[in-house]
Amino acid sequence: MTFCLPDRTPQFPVDWGNSFFMDENIANRPIRIAVLGTRGIPDVQGGIETHCQHLFPRLAKMGFEITLFARKGYVKNDDPYAYQGIHVVPLKCSHKACFESITHTLRCWRAVRKMRPDIVHIHAIGPAMFAPLFRMTGAKVIYTHHGQDYMRAKWGKFAKFTLKAGERLGTKFSHRIIVISTYIQDLLKKMYRTNRTVLIRNGVEIRTDAPKDELITLAHFGLEPQKYILACGRFVEEKGFHDLIAAYAKLPAELQQQYKLAIAGRPDHKSAYSQKLVEQAEKANVVLTGFISGDTLCAVQRNARLFCIPSYHEGLPIALLEALSYNLDVVASDIPANTEVPLPRDCFAKKGDVEDLAETIATHLASDKPNDYSSIIHEYYDWDKIAEQTAVVYRELAK
């Protein structure tokens, strides 16, 4: 795969940002990277957060000098701290859902002007709206398109308009656009006629060791090995957990007695939907673990009988890749982001179709076919390969 693509980004006036940096020979020092668009690391709920937690320590080990801007309230520290070679700087932001990304990104821009990085790496289409501002600092700008956030049900018309504007401006003004799936790559090529996309997928680590006291961990949640169906994610409508609970309620009584349904996650912001989902789950005797990470999450994931991801919208879901790393049987909605993962056709159920989801789950619970996804992970979703691919993009731009 080659990443040396022609740069046809709009040209700014030559005096925009030139006084900010490039006053020293980059060949004599590490390439400086500023990262934003994530709530923070480590162990913060969210696909982008998991992505950054795995990717950037590997890039730091390669010699890149990385500063990651986190959001206060999501990370444990209010002051800057180090994490596996990364300098993490928490900045204030609004904690109203519609203003959180905007306020944080503007504070990141002010910090970047003082920091003078060589490359600014923006994650998600919301913060990508400010790609023109980051171009003004003189830095090279990359943004990673993790998914069409304007497809999320929680956003109103203005928010969706803003997110679409972010996608458009990020695609137009960034030097490179990293896409995590061919679906997103094809979308951007069709909508914006860009040839600056670079396909670098999400990844997952294969963990073979059992976490300490995993049976005690399961017992804490009232679970037994191989006796529950698992789903993971935030309590937002596009994750489709309401469909999963409804499908579980339609399973034959003997399957409901044999298998529990457990959902690991929580809402980022309380909403009418998340409150209704909790009520629906309690009524159906669903186990809600809350947000879990580390060994606790590992114990819950690796001992599940079946993993379900009934989403209406995804980029390339890391939760699905994590399920594959444990060789779990999988049932997923048939959206492009899921079907792009090379799984057997019978793993997919029609998006939003509760009856089909229930039938597919029942079929998989009745099967005892073993799974081995290790070759898929090594070929497509290996974090070391992903870090190497990202490093190529950085080095090409830093020239």
Image (cartoon, rainbow, N blue to C red):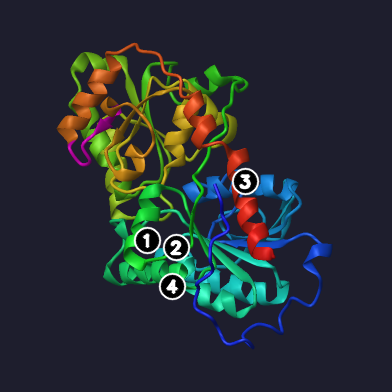
Residue bearing mark 3: 387
Residue at point 32%, 26% (across, down): 344
Tell me the SS state at disc 2: loop
Alpha-carbon neighbours of circle 4 within 10 Å: few (<14), some, or many (≥20)? some
What is the distance, in whole Å, between disc 2 and disc 1 at their CAs? 7 Å
The residue type indicated by label 1 comes to Lys
Is residue 351 located in the magenta-colored stretch of the structure? yes
The reply to whether the C-beta atoms of the residues labelled 2 and 1 are less than 8 Å apart is: yes
The tag on residue 169 is 4
Q: Nearer the viewer, mark 3 or mark 2?
A: 2
Tell me the SS state at disc 4: helix
Residue 161: horizontal and vertical position, in percent?
32, 71
**Magenta span covers which residues?**
347-353
Query: Is 337 or 242 nearer to us in this picture?
Result: 337
Tell me the SS state at disc 1: helix
Q: Quadrant of the C terminus?
A: bottom right
Taking the image as shown, residue 156 lies to the left or right of residue 70, namely left
Asked if residue 147 is positioned above or below residue 291 in the image, the reply reads below
Asked if residue 354 is positioned above or below residue 300 in the image, the reply reads below
Residue bearing mark 2: 195
The answer to which of marks 3 and 4 sits earlier in the sequence is 4
What is the distance, in whole Å, between disc 1 and disc 3 at their CAs? 24 Å
